[in-house]
Image (cartoon, rainbow, N blue to C red):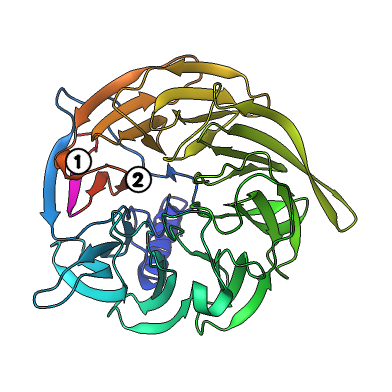
Amino acid sequence: MSCLRRPLCILVAVSLILALAGIALGAAADWPQFRGPNRDGKSPETGLLKEWPEGGPKLLWKIEGLGRGYATVSIVGDKIFTMGDRTPQGESESQFIIALDLATRKELWATRVGPPNADGGPRCTPTVDGELLYALGTDGDLVCAETATGKIRWQKSFAADFGGRMMSMWKFSESPTVDGDRLVCTPGGKDAIMVALNKKSGELIWKCAMPSIGPRGPDGAGYATMVVAEIEGVRQYVQLVGRGVIGVEAETGKFLWGYNRVANTVANITSPVVSGNYVFATTSYKTGCALLKITRSSDEFKAEEVYFHDFKDFANHHGGVILLGDYLYGGDGQNNGALCCLEFKTGKLMYKEKPLGSRSACVLYAEGQLYYRYENGLVALVDATPEGLKVKGKFMAEAAKNGPNWPHPVIHDGKLYLRNHDVLMCYDVRQQ
C-alpha cells in the first residue's frame, strides 16, 4: 500500500469505528449537567462569533410552556432536559422534569417530581447519565428517571430518608452529581450532610456526618452544587453548605476538612472552584471570598487560608465564577454583577467594572470569551483577559419581562440557550 493511501485508509477505519460507537465526526459535545461537561462553566465549543452585531445574535426560535423555574437546560444526544412548575389541564400545579426533542422542540414527556415551589419553581438542572437522569425537587424529592420515557426507576426523600434540611427558607436547589457508579448529593442532615447512592438502584453506599467546623452560618445544606476533585491524591467531593466549604472522601464518605469563615447566615450559593490543592469559595450577604490550600499529613487533611477578602473587595452572590489559567472571572456584589477579574493564587484584583446590566449576573466561558447574563435579561459578550474589560457585544434577550433571568446560559452546537421561566430561547452564535 502506498504511503498516500495508508492515511486515507486509517481515516476511513477510524470514522467507521466512531460511527459504530455512535459518535459522529464533528458532533456537538453534550451538555449533560449544570455548568457543563466538567461542571466548571466552560464550553468546549469552537467556531463562535467573536463579536456580536448590533442588537445581538440572531434569535433562531423560542418555545413556551416550560412553567415557572430557575433550572437551566441539559442537552444530550437529541434531547433537551429541564424542570418547571406547571398546572396540567384539570390538575393541580406540580413540579416536573421535562424532556424536549432537540430538532423539533416538541415535548417528549413530563414526569411529576413533587409539590410546586411558590417562590419561583425548581432550581435543579437535571443530570443526565446515559439511559438515566437525576433531578431534585425543591421539597427534597430525589428522582432517577429513564431519559427515553421519563419513567421513574427509584426515588428518595431528603427529609424522610436522611433527615435533610436547608440552611434557610429557599428550599433545595442542588443539581445531583454522578461519579462512576454513584449518585452523590447533599441532603444537609446532621448525620447525612452528604450521601452517596448506587446510581442504578438508589441503595445507600455511605453517608457523611457533619462535625462542627465553626460558629458561622446555620446547619443544613446550602444552595450550591458540588464539584469532584483530586486533592493530595484523594478523590473528594467539595461542597458549600450552611456552615461553609467542606471536602468529603469519595470512596468512604469520610469528612476530610472544613472551612467556616466564608459562611453567611442567609444563603451560601456559589459552587467552589478547585485547582490542584487549592479551593476558592465565595458567598455574598456581607461575607466575601477565600482561597484555601488543602494540605495532608498522613490521613489528616487541613484547610489553610491563603487569603480572605471581605465583601467590599469581592463576593459573588450567585451566577458563579470561572477559573481560566491564573485568573478568576465573575460578578461581584449582592444583587449586583460588577465585572471582576481576580488573580487566583494571590487574590489581586485585576479589574472591577460597573455592571453592564442590572442585578446579579451568571457567567459562561467559550473559546476565549465570557458570556454574562444579567437578572434583567441583558446578555453581554466579553473578552476573557485580565488586562481589562473588553465588551464585544450585548443585547436584551426576549422574554426578560417574565421574571429574574437567573438560569445559567448554555452553549451547544453553536447555539446559545437562555431559559426564562416558561420560555426557552435559542440564539445563533456561530461564525458564518
Marks 2 and 1, how far apart at CA: 17 Å
Q: Quadrant of the C terminus?
A: top left
Q: What x and y, as percent, mark residue 398? A: 14, 39
Task: Give the answer, above or below, for where 73 lies relative to 338.
Answer: below
Residue 45 pos. (x, y %): 37, 43
Which one is earlier in the sequence, the residue at label 2 or at label 1?
2
Whether residue 114 is visible here, answered yes or no, is: yes
Label 1 crowding class (10 Å Cα cut-off): few <14, some 14-19, many 20+?
many
Quadrant assignment, res 355: top left
Q: Residue at x 65, y 67 (%)?
A: 190
Magenta-colored span: 422-427
Crowd band around label 2 with a 10 angstrom C-alpha radius: few (<14), some (14–19), many (20+): many
From the image, tell me which residue sits under label 1: 428
Position of residue 331 measured from the top left corner of the image (x, y, whole percent)? 43, 30
Q: What element carries label 1?
A: strand
Rendered image quadrant of residue 136:
bottom left
Mark 2: secondary structure = loop
- Of marks 2 and 1, the one in the foreground: 2
**Residue tagged by mark 2?**
408
Give me the residue at 31% from left, 22% from top: 356
